[in-house]
Amino acid sequence: MGSVVVSLDAELGWGFHDLAEPPTERVEAGRRGWSTCLDLFAEYDVPATWAVVGHLMLESCDGRHADHPAPEGWFRRERTDWKDRKDLRFGADLVDALLDSEVDHEVASHSFSHVLFGRPETDRVLAAAELERSVEIADEWGLSIETFVFPRNDVGHLDVLPEYGIRAYRGASPTRDGVRGIFDTTVRNRSLLVEPTVDDHGLVNVPASLFLFGFEGPVRTVTESVWGDPMVVQARRGIDEAAQRDGLFHVWFHPNNLTNPRDDKRLRAILSYLDRKRRTSPLEVETIGEVARRIDQARGVDGGSIPSSGEVDGATTNPDSRV
Ligand SMILES: [Zn+2]
Ligand SMILES: [Zn+2]
């Protein structure tokens, strides 16, 4: 059985708050994109992994977060440019809409405040605090988080993740973004499938296959008019490959990539193709969490509730026996 995973980084202002000049179009598209994605996923009954920035799930804050070990000034935009932009800093209404959806989406974490885990400035204390806060807030919402998506895919401090109950993450894509990726997959005929693996920390890495909006600007306009939307062509190729070769194809993007109707059209074209394909071939749609559970089951780990051989024997539990 082939499988397709869709994951999104849901962040509103938080994806850009550290940038000197946040890209206005993307920043302002966050809410619109979020709602559009929810509508389209519902229309085609496609569940996705939504990696939500924890801060969005707060009702309010003091704009300082003095007890959070972030660098000086990290939350400055909350007190300056975006002081009156609660719509960019909080998103409880949107998270409610996500939870109210008839589609069984996975709520994952995209950190508490979009700290870049792979940066040398991000020490273990900060990484742990970002996870702790996210898991704590999710818990207040009655949610348990199993999947983590690194802000800007900047992987780091992997050893901290299992300490907060995380069992899976989205790893780096072997396919290059944009035009280069299209060259690799079309001219060089490189596969778009990815292989989930278990890392040294017992975490399931579900790598991305394709970023759906890595092909923008004037080049997009020219190629779209000649070939149709090259990203839709790529995505169809990946979906076909997953069905034919029993593999995993994993697309990702941000709700704020849907800046105008042309972007909505792209997502609709891909979801409708996916929906059609799964009706006619051995193909299913999974979340990252579901992939992780499948992989863990195959290797005899079910996330901790399986008794270890030590417990079965009544002897001392050996945590290593579960791995
Ligand atoms: Zn805040
Ligand atoms: Zn992000």
Image: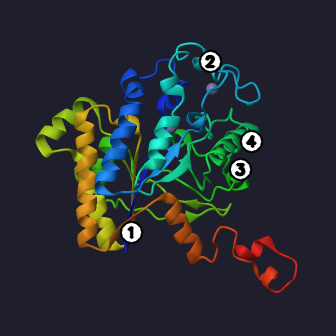
Badge 1: how crowded within 10 Å, few (<14), some, or many (20+)? Answer: many
> Residue 238 at what x, y percent from top left?
31, 59
Q: Distance between the Cα atoms at labels 4 and 3? A: 8 Å
Q: Distance between the Cα atoms at labels 2 and 3? A: 26 Å
Image: 152 above or below 234: above
Q: Earlier in the sequence, mark 1 or mark 3?
A: 3
Q: Earlier in the sequence, mark 2 or mark 3?
A: 2
Q: Distance between the Cα atoms at labels 1 and 3? A: 29 Å
> Residue 276 at what x, y percent from top left?
23, 63
Badge 2: how crowded within 10 Å, few (<14), some, or many (20+)? Answer: some
Which of the labelled discs sits on residue 284, or is there none?
Answer: none
Q: Earlier in the sequence, mark 2 or mark 1?
A: 2
Contact flag, marks 2 and 1 (Cβ < 8 Å): no
Q: Distance between the Cα atoms at labels 4 and 1? A: 35 Å
The N terminus, quarter of image: bottom left
Q: Secondary structure at mark 1?
A: loop
Contact flag, marks 4 and 3 (Cβ < 8 Å): yes
Q: Secondary structure at mark 3?
A: helix
Which of the labelled discs sits on residue 76, or is there none?
Answer: 2
Kind of residue at badge 4: Arg
Mark 3, residue position: 160
Question: Mark 2, mark 3: which one is toward the viewer?
Answer: 2
Q: Earlier in the sequence, mark 4 or mark 2?
A: 2
Mark 4, residue position: 124
Which residue is at a point 35% across and 57% down the rendered structure image? 46
Q: Secondary structure at mark 4?
A: helix
> Residue 291 at what x, y percent from top left?
50, 65
